[in-house]
Image (tube, rainbow, N blue to C red):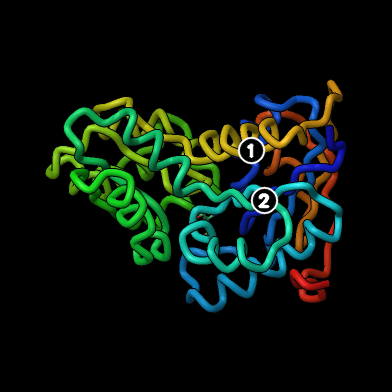
Amino acid sequence: MNRAPIGVFDSGFGGLSAVKELRRLLPGEDVVYFGDNARIPYGDKSPDTIINYSLQDAGFLLSRGVKAILVACGTVSSVALGVLKDRVSVPVVGVIEPAAKRALELTKNGVIGVIGTNATVKSGSYERTLKSLDPKVRAVSVACPLLVPLVENGYVSDDCLITRLALREYLAPLKRAGADCIILGCTHYPLIRSLIADEWGGDELVNTGLEAAKTIASILASSGSLSEGTSGRLSLFSSDSGDTFSQKASFFLEEECPEFERVDILSYGPDR
Ligand code: DGL
């Protein structure tokens, strides 16, 4: 048994969609969340910048004594996971491999769609991982840079025409390719899951945060590192502050949120 918290980080609030799944699966675990709201978006930044930011984010979580880190951000998981695993002393789980494995279970025709940020799609992370798991599979990826700002600004309800139009444009290549399953390769997309399903005309959608949460749960269980509590605490930290932070975070977490504590993220690194 290990009572230390599980660390989760993301470029902003979006990773709380993974925290929601983690707390459902492991209600007894304490969770420390860091959102890098001062530097979001990561999805349009260069690989070097994303790596530097994510080493600081992980460094902060290590300073809180976490026993494992869930990298909720699709962009960081695509670009920086290898560096994080090399430099960080606790288990680090990203979203790519767990989501790829789930997609391979779901697909019947072997054509898998991937939607994500510019950096995620440019990295080719999903294609590489899917091919390494099953060389016969075909991945079709589309960068959807408008979706994060739409979700951040609350355009998530089923009658949001602007979000529907963006999805129509982004999903067209996946329809043409005949994908029968889509990986929601970004923290924000589970919030518009029903719009995506409706515009695409299918329901086989992989929630990356859920798959990563299942993976971290099984790693901790197999090493005897789960805590045996019953009501885990959630602590929220951010590199920025704002009047509407708790309200925005509740929207991703779908529960009342504790207050955020501000962190000077520039003073952290994995070696601290
Ligand atoms: N969290 C990012 C991801 O999942 C989306 C927001 C951003 O671009 O930073 O890729």
Is residue 227 or residue 191 the one in the foreground? 227
Residues tagged 2 and 1 counted as in contact (Cβ below 8 A)? yes
Q: Position of residue 78 (x, y in %)?
A: 46, 60
Residue 145 appears anywhere in the view:
yes
Disc 2 designates what residue? 91
Which numbered disc flags the more N-terminal residue, 2 or 1? 2
Is residue 26 or residue 132 the one in the foreground? 132
- The answer to which image quadrant residue 18 occupies is top right
Q: Position of residue 72 (x, y in %)?
A: 59, 48
Quarter of the image where the C terminus is located? bottom right
Q: Amino acid at mark 2?
A: Pro
Quarter of the image where the N terminus is located? top right
Would you call the spot at circle 2 few (<14 residues within 10 Å), some (14-19), or many (20 or more)? some
Mark 2 to mark 1: distance in Å?
8 Å
Q: At x 74% / y 69%, what residue is drawn? A: 270
Q: At x 32% / y 25%, what residue is drawn? A: 203
Q: Could you tell me which secondary element the residue under label 2 belongs to? A: loop
Disc 1 designates what residue? 219
Q: Is mark 1 within 8 Å of ligand 1?
A: no
